Image: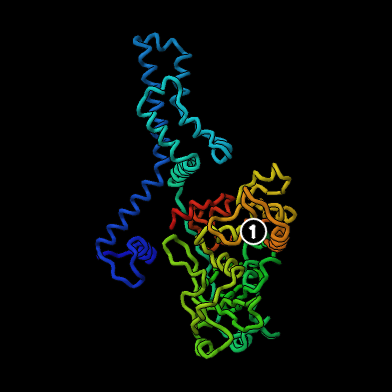
Amino acid sequence: MFIAPPEVHQGILEVVGKPQLAQLDGCDVVRWTLEQTCQSIDNNQALWATQGLSHRKRQIAYQQFISKFEDFKKLEEDKEAIAEVLSKLQEPEARSLQELYGAEGHKNQQVFELGEDEEDDETLRRLRDFVNRIGTRALKNSAVQEEQEREIAHEVEVERQVQRPTKVKPQPHSVHPGVRHFVKEGRLNANSSKAIVPAFRIFERTSAAPTMETGPWSTSLMATTDFINTVKLPPDGSLEDYLRPVNWILVSVVEDVNVNPTWLIISPFEANDLLPEIRTSMNVRLHVYTPKVSKAMTSFNSMTFHTLPAAPSTWVASPSLQRKLSLFAGNLYLEEYKEYRELCHHLGLSTIGTGLGDDTDMQIASDGFVHPSSRRKLLLQTPPAAGSSASPGPSPTSRLSASSSSTALEKARDLSPFSRSPLPFVKAVIAMRRRGQNFNHTHIGHIVNSRIVNEDDFAKDS
């Protein structure tokens, strides 16, 4: 008998190609295990190759040094020869930011370039050919991975102490009449403002408040006060340790608000209490949602996993509200490269790096945030994602016509509502949701740490 968490079960189903409710057997588990082993080997090839090159070059340098000195007494006197071989054997204890994360893999290039006395070594030639074949991008990733391994080695020496939040009394549950009105009519009324507020206002009572630009987040993503207020706190008390997970969403389906629909996050108590009214309502639907916090999890971003009443097959969730909901709930993984580009454009981030600003006078900050005045230029110079039917800008080998250029400029005007970088706020929100767990290796972790995610990264995950 095999016992595994849901994300592992989902991963096995995807590897063996079986439907969701299919029965798994031991062969399926072994096949998934072998697949994970192969992926791990493939991911570590660049790191092992560079380590092998470095080791073999030091070995050759040492052998050549020893062969020159048969008399060890003479060896002690030749200080210059000792210094020369030590420079080849020792690795630098520290590296500059340019060497680790610069545009060119300077350190890796030195590793796979062979000297005249090393060209005759068959092992070095084979390793060099392999490293050149897998490309410089894999080498850069191996350098980052090697640095992370060093950091982890130091972290093991640290004994972490969990500081739990102060004990407080729970907030009594209640369903406000304004919420019942929303279920019945699909609209907010004047009375609703006391019980329904913009969802992101919850972070005004956390440590993320100083980094929050209020305007862009105050949209149609709303939350009830019963969802927000989980415990009894003084007016200036922090909700940081008492955030409720997002699982139940009421979506308005009234026709005249479809252009700008309202999504209302409710508490489990409200979902249970309002269930009979939701079943008979013609103006709202209850959607089940949970953030994707591991690669193998099923994505709920489409908002069609389970609805009550059932959603029409033609219904498509609002992309803008999808993005805000995923950030609010602490979603860590994206489904495709197109989704990554759209999220970055919404946050005002460049998806082609920060170096472009040096040549085009565009204002791009070190974290990738594009100044509002430069977004139109960047949109026109950003190549489209592979397979996309509608591109926001031209490919490097084509030019926009006058009409398509005008359309692109209109899209750029409303592309991002942020006037300053939202990354510090997003990073603080995700950190609260993860409660101290590391998320730097995820798609959102790459974004908030100003690291570019490439299309190949999504191809490896699929």
Which x, y percent locates residue 267?
53, 78
Crowd class of label 1 (few under 14; some 14 to 19; many from 20; radius 10 Å): many
Query: Residue 16 or 101: which is nearer the viewer?
Result: 16
Does 140 sit above or below residue 306? Answer: above
Q: What is the three-letter code of the residue carrying label 1? A: Pro
SS at circle 1: loop
Give the farthest residue toward the right: 373
Dividing the picture into quarters, in which one does residue 12 lie? bottom left
Does 53 sit above or below residue 333? Answer: above
Residue at 73% over, 57% down: 402
**Exactly how many numbered labels are in the figure?**
1
The answer to whether residue 418 is seen in the rendering is no
Which x, y percent locates residue 345?
63, 58
Q: Is residue 409 left or right of residue 96?
A: right
Residue at 70% over, 55% down: 375
Name the residue carrying label 1: 392
Which x, y percent locates residue 324?
60, 67
Query: Residue 343 or 153: which is nearer the viewer?
Result: 343
- The quarter of the image holding the C terminus is bottom left
Does 66 sit above or below residue 398? Answer: above
Does 334 sit above or below residue 285? Answer: above
- The quarter of the image holding the N terminus is bottom left
Q: Is residue 374 left or right of residue 458?
A: right
Which x, y percent locates residue 152?
45, 46
